[in-house]
């Protein structure tokens, strides 16, 4: 864990409520996790659905990500 | 006055001029949210083929750029237009870039998203290249999720079922 609370993990470990930092540096507050996305077993989609914005990110379950919870 | 069909909705074209959806009343319309950097982006080719095949029989394909899925449509209107014409020779009309889900969902998608897909699910658009088929009277008659190809038997059959009679 880094000093600011970020943990390196894989997309498979991400849960609703996590803050997800993407490779672009952008952050996503995960409100929903959609496994087997678009019918692909190893594809997972994270949705931020808040009063401020709606944004989805799909990635392979093995993708390395940074999360904070 | 609240919109009662997509033909009553105001939206701009990709070039910033008004997009006259009301002028499409009496035609079938296939509305598709698009993105330039998605694994599904090659669907543009089949969309253009469907557009060319059916436009003289009363179908209009409408592309709706959206950056809410993987931030895969980040470009300016000029960049999007250039990509579509140079990569896929797109000739069907495109709207401005809009939100299709969430708190700033465009009124066009307020009309579309209550429609259920074949599995009975309505609500949020799932990803880029989701397709909604609107009949000439404005009724949303079919919804196809992103992996259903524009030239699939399901989509083409539905289109042929709602083309205006000649």
Image: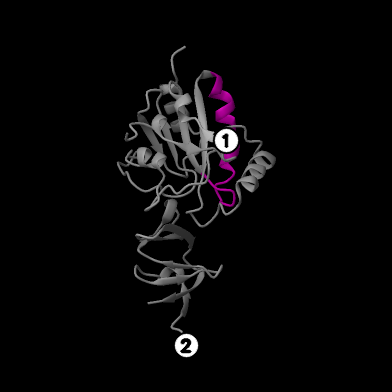
Instruction: Examine the rendered structure and indicate whether residue B66 appears above or below residue A65.
Output: above
Q: Are marks 1 and 2 in contact (CB under 8 Å)?
A: no
Front residue of B95 and B92 = B95
Residue under label 1, please give it. Answer: B46
Tell me the chief SS of the magenta region. helix
Instruction: Please give the chain letter of the residue carrying mark 1.
Output: B
Residue at image point 47% right, 38% down: B11
Q: Is residue B151 visible?
A: no
Front residue of A49 and B78 = B78
Indicate which label's residue lies in the foreground, 1 or 2: 2
Instruction: Examine the rendered structure and indicate whether residue B52 appears above or below residue B132.
Output: above
Judged from the image, the secondary structure of the residue bearing numbered disc 1 is helix
Residue at image point 49% right, 30% down: B20
Instruction: Please give the chain letter of the residue carrying mark 2.
Output: A
Q: Residues within 10 Å of mark 2 (few under 14, many from 20)?
A: few
- Do the residues indicated by labels 1 and 2 lie within the same chain of the protein? no
Magenta region includes residue B46: yes
Residue A64 in the figure: left or right of residue B100: right
Residue under label 2, please give it. Answer: A3
């Amino acid at each position: 864990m880094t000093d600011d609370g970020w943990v390196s993990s894989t997309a498979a470990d991400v849960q609703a409520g996590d803050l997800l930092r993407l490779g672009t540096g952008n952050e996503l507050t995960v409100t929903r996790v959609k496994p087997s996305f678009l019918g692909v077993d190893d594809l997972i989609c994270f949705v931020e659905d808040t009063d401020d914005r709606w944004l989805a990110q799909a990635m392979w379950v093995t993708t390395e990500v940074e999360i904070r919870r | 006055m609240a919109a009662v069909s997509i033909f009553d909705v105001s939206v701009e074209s990709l070039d910033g001029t008004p997009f006259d959806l009301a002028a499409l009343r009496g035609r079938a319309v296939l509305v598709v949210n698009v993105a330039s950097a998605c694994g599904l982006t090659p669907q543009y080719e089949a969309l253009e083929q469907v557009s060319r095949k059916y436009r003289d029989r009363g179908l209009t394909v409408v592309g709706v750029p959206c950056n809410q899925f993987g931030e895969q449509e980040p470009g300016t209107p000029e960049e999007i237009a250039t990509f579509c014409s140079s990569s896929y020779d797109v000739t069907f009309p495109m709207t401005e870039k809009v939100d299709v889900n969430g708190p700033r969902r465009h009124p066009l998608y307020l009309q579309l998203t209550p429609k259920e897909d074949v599995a009975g699910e309505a609500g949020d658009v799932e990803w880029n290249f989701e397709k909604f088929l609107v009949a000439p009277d404005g009724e949303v008659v079919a919804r196809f999720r992103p992996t259903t190809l524009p030239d699939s038997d399901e989509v083409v059959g539905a289109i042929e079922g709602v083309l205006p009679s000649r």
